[in-house]
Image (spheres, rainbow, N blue to C red):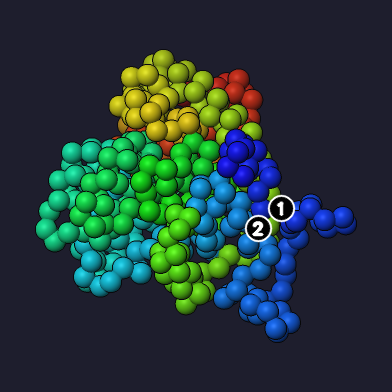
Amino acid sequence: MSQYARSTVAVAAGRPPAEPGAPVNTPIAASVTFHQGAEQNYLRQSGSDSLRAFQEALGELEGGRALAFSSGMAAIAAVVEGLPAGSTVVVPRMTYSGTSSIHDHQERLGRLEVRRVEISDTAAVLEALRREPAPALLWIETPTNPMVGVADVPALAEAAHAVGATVVVDSTWNSPLLLRPLEHGADVVMHSVTKYLSGHSDLLMGALVTGPDDDERFAAFKLRRDLTGGLPGMLETFLALRGIRTLAVRMERAQANAGVLAQRLAAHPAVERVLYPGLPDDPGHDLVARLHDGPGAMLSFLVAGGAPAADRVCAAVRLVTNATSLGGVETLVERRAQYAVDAANGTPDNLLRLSVGIEDVQDLWADLSRALG
Ligand SMILES: *Cc1c(COP(=O)(O)O)cnc(C)c1O
């Protein structure tokens, strides 16, 4: 499907063979066991048509081979817990709270040595990579949660490979439409499918994507999934693939809305600062312009008046929903420093993270500007 635009691939990939009378969509294969005599015999191990269809579509979109997991965290665990005991890892200081927590936990168990760096500070990451002992893994999240820092994936991947480290990119905020990390030297792409790929805040799912010829890593992750039973349900898999069909139009609209809201928030007297790489003076602007196909639909902003003022905005919105998570059709806002992990990572007290949805942007602005007072 490489001749097609990504928006076309999102619609066309992972379909059943075009035969007279065959279904156009892969049906939900609700069976755990299968008649013997073929490779497919038990769902946890051999998967099913629903799973294969989803994985084929995501693999085509990322330019690699995808494995679906029961959640983003299950996919992260397959990587992190699969490392040999005693390995050193370099991870972002500012990152999704679950990613921070699993590394903290592995450190407490005495399994991993963890070096935490600001991933958008290329020089700091290179320094952390070059220290002894050589790290086994570089974990990149870009843009970062919730400071929206942008990582220079090709520069970091090159430096990581020079010391023998595997490079994983949590590309949840981008979706394959805005960034294809494998094209920039990453070894593995991780997605919380819960977010943009499925797109409706109604299911939990995750995925890992390896390079097209990387049999070794693919087999290692598949083994972790088999052994831990971290497979998604088939209804979730079906719904996630249905979500992918509309990914391009959802992302286009959400991103356009985010651009408008970022500009208006930046000009609002109750807002101290907007963090969004789509704004020309944002520190991530040039990198996003060079590596990404768009700045995305996630932004953060600092509310004048500290945490109480930020909490008042969350309490005052009516159309926008005060809830965690992101990447759905509905706009969500939350104050991240309410979570201990985020506060400990240095998230400003007055930071609101906004996952911009696909509503009419004038309605969104009317709601936000009224809530800001
Ligand atoms: C939500 C999220 C995860 C975790 O995924 P789940 O599906 O909730 O387990 C990981 N990384 C990022 C960037 C996320 O937003």
Residue at 33 percent across and 41 percent down: it is 153
Element type at mark 1: loop
Quarter of the figure with residue 34: bottom right
27 displayed left or right of 50: right
Is residue 212 visible in this depiction of the protein?
yes
Figure quadrant of the N terminus: top right
Q: Nearer the viewer, residue 36 or 150?
A: 36
Distance between mark 1 and mark 2 Cα atoms: 7 Å
**Amino acid type assigned to the residue bearing label 1 in the image:** Arg
For disc 2, the marked residue is 53
The single residue placed furthest to the bottom in the displayed view is: 36
User: Disc 2 marks which amino acid?
Assistant: Ala
Residues packed near mark 1 inside 10 Å, few (<14), some (14 to 19) or many (20 plus): some
User: Who is closer to the viewer here, 181 or 298?
Assistant: 181
> With 336 as the anchor, is 318 left or right in this view?
right
Provide the secondary structure element on which disc 2 rests. Answer: helix
Q: Is residue 170 above or below residue 103?
A: above
- In the rendered structure, the answer to whether residue 48 lies left or right of residue 365 reads right
x and y, in percent, of residue 240 in the image: 63, 53
Residue at x 47%, y 29% (from the top left corner): 294
Q: Percent from the top left, x then y, of residue 285?
A: 36, 25
Residue 302, position as x, y percentages in the image: 36, 29
Is the residue 145 above or below the residue 239 in the image?
Answer: above
User: Residue 15's mark?
Assistant: 1
Residue at left offset 30%, top offset 27% = 283
Q: Do the numbered discs 1 and 2 sit on residues whose CB atoms are within 8 Å?
A: yes
| Residue 74, numbered label | none
